[in-house]
Structures are given as structure tokens and as C-alpha cells.
Image (tube, rainbow, N blue to C red):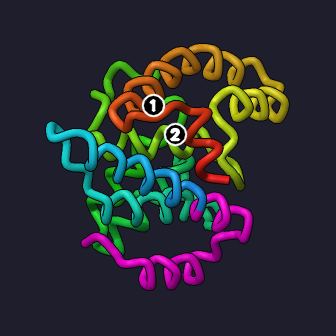
């Protein structure tokens, strides 16, 4: 099942999603929907599932305020919750959105919807700020070597993904940032 926005908001309440994450998820929803519509307008090779993208954008951080089971990290608990709620398609979407997934050679990269969600999440804080600023924030927030290794390894791959997706949409990152403000 792919939930409607009313169901999503009930889940936010049920799982106590913090306000800052709600704002972030709403902005990611706005970005994914814009990109999806541009791709659908311009490209006959792809038909982006906007309904799945909206639900996934709004639920991708659903596990930020819940207890994790032993061995779970973000978004493992979210995947578990969404499967329990009968939302397997959305669970699969959010499973691939963490930054480190782009470096995992065992993860075939993904559907067009997964790529769009991944990219929009990486370009967005509470507002869309773009990849360079977002990665800069992560560098300033995380001072451990392991985090910096992931940032260093993932950045060129995320830039390549950005270029691929935004080329399909027929826009630049700068144009997208201006349009979303």
C-alpha cells in the first residue's frame, strides 16, 4: 500500500516524528515532486511514480524518534515499521536513501524513484541548500574519521547522480534551488 498524505500525517503522530524532521520531509516532498513532474513532462523513457515518491519523501525519516531494535540503525527501524504498516513499496524506497548506500557495490542503484528520493534528501535540510552546502554541514557536524571517509567516498557519486537526474529533468541545481525558495 502507498499511503495518502492524511495517512502519512497520522503516522507522523503515531511515531512522534519531531517538528524539524516534519519540515525536512515536507521540503523533500516538494523537491521530489518538482523533479518527478519535470522528468515526466520531458522524458518518454521514464514514468516516475509521483504518488510513491510523495509518500516516501514524507516517511523517509519516520524512525528518527523511535527505539531501534538491537543492530538497527536509520533507516532500518523505518523499514521495519513501514513493512508492519503494510507499506512495502515505501519501505523499499527508504531502505536505499542513507548516504552510505551510494558507495555499496552490493546495492544495484535503483529505480528512478529511489534515485530522486536519495538526491532530494541529500540536497535538503529544512530548505533546499544544494549538495555542496549539505556536505559542508555534514563535515562540520561529524568530526569522526569514519564519517569523513563516507563523505569523501560518496560525494563524487552523489554529484554524478545529481547530474544524471537533473539532466533528465532539464534543470540545473541552481535553478532548482531558486525555484524551491
Residue farthest to the left, as pictured? 45
Dot 1 crowding, Cα within 10 Å, few <14, some 14–19, many 20+: some
Question: With respect to residue 179, does 50 lie above or below?
Answer: below
Say which of 42 and 149 sits in front. Answer: 42
The vertical placement of 124 against 23, above or below, is above
- The residue at 50%/65% (across/down) is 58
Residue at left offset 29%, top offset 70%: 2
Report the magenta stretch's main SS: helix
Measured as percent of width and height from the top left, residue 97 is found at 46, 42
Q: Are marks 2 and 1 in contact (CB under 8 Å)?
A: yes
How many C-alpha atoms fall within 10 Å of the one at disc 2: few (<14), some, or many (≥20)? some
Q: Which residue is mark 2?
A: 98
Q: How many marks?
A: 2
The spot of residue 72 in percent (x, y) is: 52, 49
Relative depth, front residue between 129 and 115: 129
- Quadrant including the N terminus: bottom left
Q: Is residue 6 magenta?
A: yes
Alpha carbon of mark 2 to alpha carbon of mark 1: how far? Answer: 6 Å
Question: Could you say whether the residue bearing mark 2 is in a helix, strand or loop?
Answer: loop
The residue at 83%/26% (across/down) is 143
At which x and y percent is residue 45? 15, 37
Residue 23 as seen in the image, left or right of residue 8: right
Q: Is residue 78 left or right of residue 137?
A: left
The residues colored magenta run: 1-26
Element type at mark 1: helix
Quarter of image, res 110: top left
Left or right position of 49 against 58: left
Q: Quadrant of residue 44?
A: top left
Residue 44 lies in the magenta stretch: no
| Point 38% across, 28% down: residue | 167
What residue is shown with label 1? Answer: 101
Q: Position of residue 136 (x, y in %)?
A: 77, 27
Amino acid at each position: 500500500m502507498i499511503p495518502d498524505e492524511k495517512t502519512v500525517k497520522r503516522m507522523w503522530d503515531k511515531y512522534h516524528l519531531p517538528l524539524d524532521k516534519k519540515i525536512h520531509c515536507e521540503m523533500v516532498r516538494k523537491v521530489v515532486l518538482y523533479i518527478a513532474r519535470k522528468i515526466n513532462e520531458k522524458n518518454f523513457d521514464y514514468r516516475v511514480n509521483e504518488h510513491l515518491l510523495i509518500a516516501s519523501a514524507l516517511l523517509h525519516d519516520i524512525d528518527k524518534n523511535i527505539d531501534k531494535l538491537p543492530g538497527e540503525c536509520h533507516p532500518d527501524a523505518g523499514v521495519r515499521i513501514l513493512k508492519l504498516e503494510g507499506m512495502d513499496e515505501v519501505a523499499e524506497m527508504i531502505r536505499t536513501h542513507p548516504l552510505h548506500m551510494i558507495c555499496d557495490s552490493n546495492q544495484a542503484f535503483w529505480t528512478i524513484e529511489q534515485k530522486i528520493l536519495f538526491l532530494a534528501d541529500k540536497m535538503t535540510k529544512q530548505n533546499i541548500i544544494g549538495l555542496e552546502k549539505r556536505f559542508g554541514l555534514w563535515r562540520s557536524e561529524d568530526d569522526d574519521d569514519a564519517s569523513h571517509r563516507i563523505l569523501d567516498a560518496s560525494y563524487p557519486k552523489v554529484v554524478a547522480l545529481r547530474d544524471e537526474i537533473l539532466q533528465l529533468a532539464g534543470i540545473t541545481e541552481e535553478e532548482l534551488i531558486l525555484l524551491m525558495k
